Amino acid sequence: MEGADWADSFIALRHGPAPAAADMAGRMLGNPPAWAQALLSLRDTLVRPFGLKTAATADPNAVNGFPLLRSDGGIAVLGLDDTHLDFRIVVTVTARGAAGFALRVTTLVRRHGLAGRLYLAAVLPAHRLIVPAILNRV
């Protein structure tokens, strides 16, 4: 994402044939742990009064509130642009031959002003728990 000013990435190695990245994105984001879903619902409740986008206001074809922007075999890009920040979730699947495949989730963020910085600081502790937990479930 052009202009991203924050990023992180998590990787997991898996056995078996490499699936399409969009399929993995759907599996990861479509069925998060119950505690992670509760945190996402709480987030939506807290930001609604500020006019920020929520899962309910996302594209109806979105995966758990995350619109699929691009899908091309080994890479899927989800995300949205909002007043406080723009973000992308990049799911990459790389075949490793007989060893299986590598699944990488990279988050890219472009913050808009103080609101974006404060928001990201508030959600980072949960983000750092949720992404690895979702990776471990697939």
Image (spheres, rainbow, N blue to C red):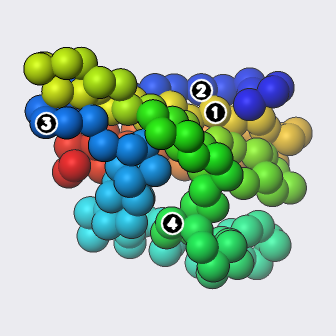
Mark 2 element type: strand
Q: Mark 1 vs mark 2: which is more N-terminal?
A: 2
What residue is disc 2 on? 7
What residue is disc 1 on? 108
Query: At 76% across and 45% down in the image, what residue appears?
Result: 86
Q: Are marks 1 and 2 in contact (CB under 8 Å)?
A: yes
Position of residue 137 in the picture relative to residue 6 (left or right): left
Mark 1 or mark 3, whichever is nearer to me: 3
Position of residue 9 in the picture relative to residue 138 (left or right): right
Mark number, residue 63: 4
Q: Please identify the quadrant where the N terminus is shown.
A: top right
Q: Mark 4 vs mark 3: which is more N-terminal?
A: 3
Q: Amino acid at mark 1?
A: Leu
Q: Are marks 1 and 3 in contact (CB under 8 Å)?
A: no
What residue is disc 3 on? 16
- Reply above or below: 125 against 38: above
Q: CA distance from mark 1 to mark 2?
A: 5 Å
Query: At 26% across and 63% down in the image, what residue appears?
Result: 33
Residue 100, position as x, y percentages in the image: 17, 27
Q: Mark 2 vs mark 4: which is more N-terminal?
A: 2
Q: CA distance from mark 1 to mark 3?
A: 28 Å
- Reply above or below: 58 against 126: below
Q: Amino acid at mark 2?
A: Ala
Q: Is residue 60 visible?
A: yes
Residue 108, position as x, y percentages in the image: 63, 33
